[in-house]
Image (cartoon, rainbow, N blue to C red):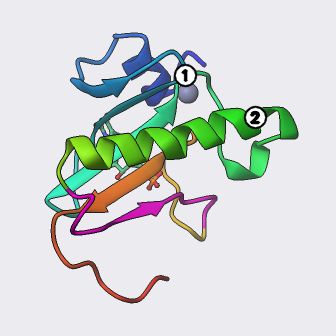
Amino acid sequence: MEECIFCKIVAGELPTELIYEDDVVAAFADISPMAPVHALIIPKKHLAGVDELSEEDAGVVGHMIMAAQRLARQLGVSASGYRLVINTGADATQTVPHLHVHLLGGRPLEPKLG
Ligand code: 5GP
Ligand code: ZN
């Protein structure tokens, strides 16, 4: 996806420090953090969002969650707790059409979702 900013980050075309990377996923700090810890975990392969996933993508999604667990430990929020968020589509305010998990933590988060 040539115009996808997250694909550009994976390709090294947008200078962004990766805080975690393996064969399947990459992670980096959100450019507009909403909490002391705010990272994004993305698949290296372009997948637009949850609604576009097919059964064959299930392994990638599982891998993203396990990477989030690892990253939470790395960033020191495992004990205090953290929230994983995937926005999907317009009503959920998804702004980047490349699947991503938000990892938020480092302070008590608002109890309400939505
Ligand atoms: P969404 O609203 O789609 O769930 O989340 C997209 C997130 O990507 C937003 O929190 C936004 O701050 C972040 N973001 C957008 N563009 C960039 C970028 O170029 N670099 C980084 N690191 N984060 C970005
Ligand atoms: Zn992409």
Can residue 48 be spotted in the picture? no
Q: Quadrant of ligand 2?
A: top right
Tell which of 77 and 84 is nearer to you.
Answer: 77
Q: Residue at position x 57%, y 41% from top?
A: 99
Q: Residue furthest top?
A: 12
Is residue 41 in sight in this rendering? yes
- Which type of secondary structure does the marked residue at label 1 adopt? loop
Query: Considering the image in quadrants, where does the N terminus appear?
Result: top right
| Magenta stretch in the rendered image | 77-90
Residue at 20% x, 55% y: name it: 37
Identify the element where label 2 is drawn: helix
The front one of 84 and 49 is 84
The image shows residue 45 at horizontal and vertical percentages of 61, 22
54 to 91, vertically: above or below? above
* Residue named by callout 1: 24
Q: Is residue 22 left or right of residue 61?
A: left
| Crowding near the residue tagged with mark 2, few <14, some 14–19, many ≥20 C-alpha atoms within 10 Å | few
Q: Is residue 63 left or right of residue 111?
A: right
Question: How many marks on residues?
Answer: 2
Mark identifier at residue 57: 2
- The rendered magenta stretch, by its main secondary structure, is classed as loop
Give the percent coordinates (x, y) of residue 50.
69, 50
- For the point 32% across and 28% down, which residue is it? 20
